[in-house]
Image (cartoon, rainbow, N blue to C red):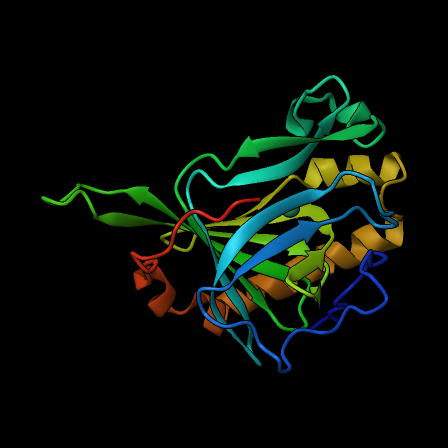
Amino acid sequence: MSIVVPRPLASAAPRDAREPGYAPFWPAGHVIRWHYRRPGWQEGEPSNIVPLTVVRDDERGLVAWLAAGTEQEITVAEDGSELHSLPLEEMWLRPRVGLRTPWRGNGILRIAPVGVPWSVWLFWSPGDADADGLEWRFAGWYVNLENAHLRSGDITISSDHILDIDIDADGIIRKKDEDELEAGVAQGRVSEAEAAQITANAEEAIASFRAGDWPFAEEWQEWRPDSDWTVPAL
Ligand code: MG
């Protein structure tokens, strides 16, 4: 087993930020904001921010719901192009601006286990709808490699690690965006050593899935949002 480094990238949390996993916990139904900041982020710079509704928050970690249609802030290139549409050679060099846009697709459940450099996102696709049109079909997990979270007030803060892991509903595992991580090293977004640590962390995340750790438990595939919850505002 390699060593897991919870925050391989410089954290961009305020001085009063605290570790999750300790009281006071956020109550179920509470609206929080989930931030991704670039390493070295400074006040006033754009970042990724989305409001979610807390499902469970305790010593194991945070589970929160991102409802379909939620307005979020994302970062895009200055001319408005989405980052994934940029040529790889300049992806990490182009200045960015913030853009408000709704979360596209179905709602997802995000799980941030305490102390690990990833969060686990559960996706569903519309299944064969029953009379109420309520059937969901579990579509798999997306493991977003990222700094272990810190929180301050009602926000939880992380930094994205570029590399991701897709795990389909049958458990087929595929790493994603390895080329973007390489470009990140070439363009100075992350160092060679940081990229090596992120890649090692990915193996630990895969081991966590194979071990059936709690974020991958079946209960979450069966979980559904409270029908009283409304879509939170950014
Ligand atoms: Mg990612």
Image location of residue 197, percent across then percent down: 79, 59
Classify residue 12 by image quadrant: bottom right
Horizontal arrangement in the rendering, residue 183 relative to residue 167 (left or right): right
Depicted 95 relative to depicted 5: above or below: above
Classify residue 185 by image quadrant: top right
Classify residue 204 by image quadrant: bottom right
Q: Give me the residue at 83% from left, 50% from top.
A: 39
Depicted 164 relative to depicted 55: above or below: above
Q: Give me the residue at 74% from left, 56% from top.
A: 198
Give 114 or 154, whichever is nearer the viewer.
154
Q: Give me the residue at 72% from left, 36% from top.
A: 180
- Tell me the quadrant of the picture where the N terminus can be found: bottom right
Image location of residue 14, percent across then percent down: 83, 61
- Tell me the quadrant of the picture where the C terminus can be found: top right
Count up the numbered dots.
0
Give 4 or 203, whichever is nearer the viewer.
4
Image location of residue 114, percent across then percent down: 63, 73
Depicted 32 relative to depicted 134: above or below: below
Horizontal arrangement in the rendering, residue 129 relative to residue 76 (left or right): left
Horizontal arrangement in the rendering, residue 230 relative to residue 215 (left or right): left
Can you name the residue that lies furthest to the top here? 79
Q: Give me the residue at 29% from left, 56% from top.
A: 227
Image location of residue 138, percent across then percent down: 33, 51
